[in-house]
Amino acid sequence: MSKLYIIPTPIGNLEDITLRAIRILKEVDLILAEDTRTSKPLLKHFEITTPLQSHHLYNEHEKVNLIIQELKFGRTIALISDAGTPAISDPGFLLVRECIKNDIDVETLPGATAFVPALVNSGLPCERFSFEGFLPQKKGRQTKLESLVEEPRTMIFYESPHRLIKTLNSFADYFGQERKASVSREISKMFEENRRGTLRELIDYFEQKTIKGEIVIVVQGK
């Protein structure tokens, strides 16, 4: 019976994958991966030999109809990203939407995603939050930040290491230097770091460091 499985993969420690995810990855007919080079070591580690194809931001529009046809023929397919849960700041939404349009069953497994441990580790209120993902790099960045000035909920952002200082300075400009925040990087890896303080304190700290790893910034709401 045809089905699309959305399967989270570890964001750091390989032990974070679930037993169910491993079983399904072994059982499906095909695995779609954001970057096959990144996924191969993971699959090899768990002795998963299922055929692998690329499915990323730059080819998902041209490939989605072919994948839908494969599913209509009765195949089972799993979608994974480089790390974490597909469709959360990663490809996946388009394929899920088209499956729903075509009455193809979609099953999403629970599992690793970076923003949940970062939010809990921040010490900021967790009961209500706004996940913003990556900010626009140029066009729309100012508009987005202006729209969040009055946001009362805890805000969560993804960022790359080389833009961290710029983004923290932007937050200080729009939200105030004394706004509380946290920066989490290398989550679930050997050198995981969770740094908490005001935006000014975080800027001063990270300006003195060589910054590596994917980053989650959690900012207190107004």
Image (cartoon, rainbow, N blue to C red):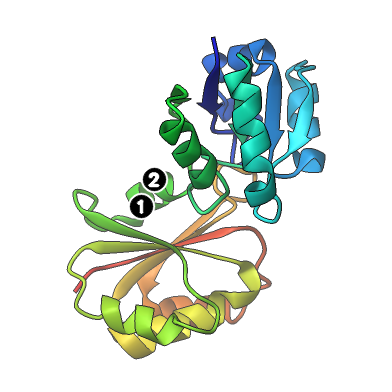
Label 2: how many Cα within 10 Å (few below 14, some 14–19, many 20+): few
Please indicate whether residue 91 sits to the left or right of residue 39 in the image.
Answer: left
Q: Provide residue 1's location: percent of width, then percent of height.
A: 54, 9
Quarter of the figure with residue 15: top right
Q: Residue at x 65, y 15 (%)?
A: 28
Secondary structure, mark 2, is: helix
Please state which of residues 125 and 82 is positioned toward the viewer in this rendering.
Answer: 82
Q: Given the image, on which type of amino acid does mark 2 rest?
A: Val
Label 1: how many Cα within 10 Å (few below 14, some 14–19, many 20+): many
Please state which of residues 44 and 54 is positioned toward the viewer in this rendering.
Answer: 54
Q: Is residue 91 visible?
A: yes
Disc 2 designates what residue? 116
- Residue 141's label in the rendered image is none
Quarter of the figure with residue 76: top right
User: Disc 1, disc 2: CB below 8 Å?
Assistant: yes
Q: Provide residue 65's location: percent of width, then percent of height.
A: 62, 38
Please state which of residues 79 and 204 is positioned toward the viewer in this rendering.
Answer: 79
Q: Residue at x 24, y 50 (%)?
A: 126
Please indicate whether residue 174 sits to the left or right of residue 191 in the image.
Answer: left
In the image, residue 11 above or below residue 51: below
Q: Residue at x 30, y 84 (%)?
A: 146
The total of numbered circles placed on residues is 2
Disc 1 designates what residue? 119
Q: Which residue is outermost to the bottom?
A: 173
In the image, residue 185 above or below residue 8: below
Q: Provide residue 150's location: percent of width, then percent of height.
A: 19, 78
Q: Provide residue 29's location: percent of width, then percent of height.
A: 69, 16
Q: Given the image, on which type of amino acid does mark 1 rest?
A: Leu
